[in-house]
Amino acid sequence: MSDALAAQGYLADEGLATAIFLALALHRPLLLEGDAGVGKTEVAKVLATWTGGRLLRLQCYEGIDAAQALYEWDYARQLLYLRAAEGAAGHDRADPGQAIDEVYSPRFLVRRPLLAALEHHGGPPPVLLIDEVDRADDEFEALLLEVLSDYSVTIPELGTIRAEVAPLVVITSNRTRDVHDALKRRCLYHWVEHPDFEREVAIVVRRAPQVLPGLARQVAAAVEQLRDLHLLKPPGVAETIDWATALAALGRSTIDEHSVEQTLGAVLKYREDQDKVRDAGIGDLVRAALARGA
């Protein structure tokens, strides 16, 4: 599994690779928690590329409900169809009662990611990404429990729709709030850690080939130092890649105090964090990163 993920550009540690393997083998949803930017969402994208399945992404937010996550009826098309049927009925070419029944047929159903994942027919199973579930509310978690319990949903006008092949489900959470135990029980769970130094260097080199290996090591070392400063938002792997790419775009082959000062916005997204780094001493940060990256 590690080799398969690496072939798609994702360098996972043994724990994450094992969790992904078990989720596929046991046909269980995989709940990934961890700090923002550690590569949770990327797992679903890589799985879709590797398996050839369609990626269906549901971005969670406060107030999301079944209409945005599961399905809704296309009321505008239904209304146009009924008006057309009424006009045809005036010329004895249609039965208005039949038209009313037809407006609740699948052709007028707008399928959102959850229903689209259940209605898959033929080919590799889709990869359903339920991203940042911690942003949603309790009612939406209850909806997920119903859908993920047996991969089916009941639409009153059409009946029960059950998946012929269970989708591959990846649920991510930044843990801004705790996900309920009932949802966790239905999933395999893995906490995604920040990568160690050497693996982070390998990730930067692979994802940003324009960055020289020496610069990649120095940037990864600097980010390692930043994560020890107890910042409001410690930088993730995504920020490490952005920072290395920004320095490479400026023509840098090594970090220095001036370039770090001018590009802090690529890695730290809070003014308080930037001030904290400046107070701690950018010179000390650079010297430690150069020594670690040597």
Image: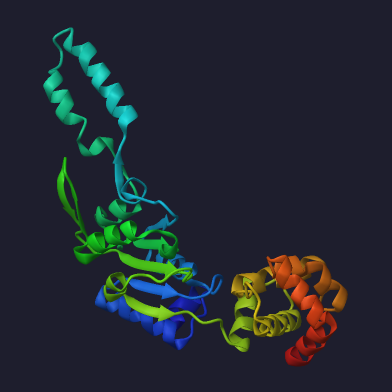
Q: Answer with the quarter of the image where residue 28 lies.
A: bottom left
- Identity of the residue furthest to the right in this view: 258
Residue 90, quarter of picture: top left
Residue 23 x/y as whole percent: 32, 76
Residue at 56% of width from left, 81% of height from top?
194
* Type of colouring: rainbow
Please state, as top left, top right, bottom left or bottom right, where the N terminus lies in the image: bottom left
The answer to whether residue 53 is above or below residue 3 is above
Q: How many dots with numbers?
A: 0
Which sits in the foreground, 134 or 83?
134
In the image, 239 versus 273, the foreground residue is 273
Q: Quadrant of residue 262?
A: bottom right
Look at the picture and state if 8 lies above or below 71: below
Residue 103 in view here: yes
Q: Between residues 282 and 8, which one lies in front from this camera angle?
A: 282
Q: Position of residue 222 (x, y in %)?
A: 72, 82
Visible residue check, residue 123: no
Judge from the rendering whether residue 56 lies leftward or rightward of residue 203; answer left or right: left
Q: Is residue 29 left or right of residue 200?
A: left
Q: Residue at x 31, y 55 (%)?
A: 114
Q: Residue at point 33% right, 57% down?
A: 140
Tell me where residue 108 appears, x and y as whole percent: 27, 35
Residue 142, given in percent of the width and then of the height, sits at: 28, 60
Quarter holding the C terminus? Answer: bottom right
User: Considering only vertical position in the picture, is 85 above or below 285?
Assistant: above
Q: Is residue 247 left or right of residue 72?
A: right
- Residue, far top: 91
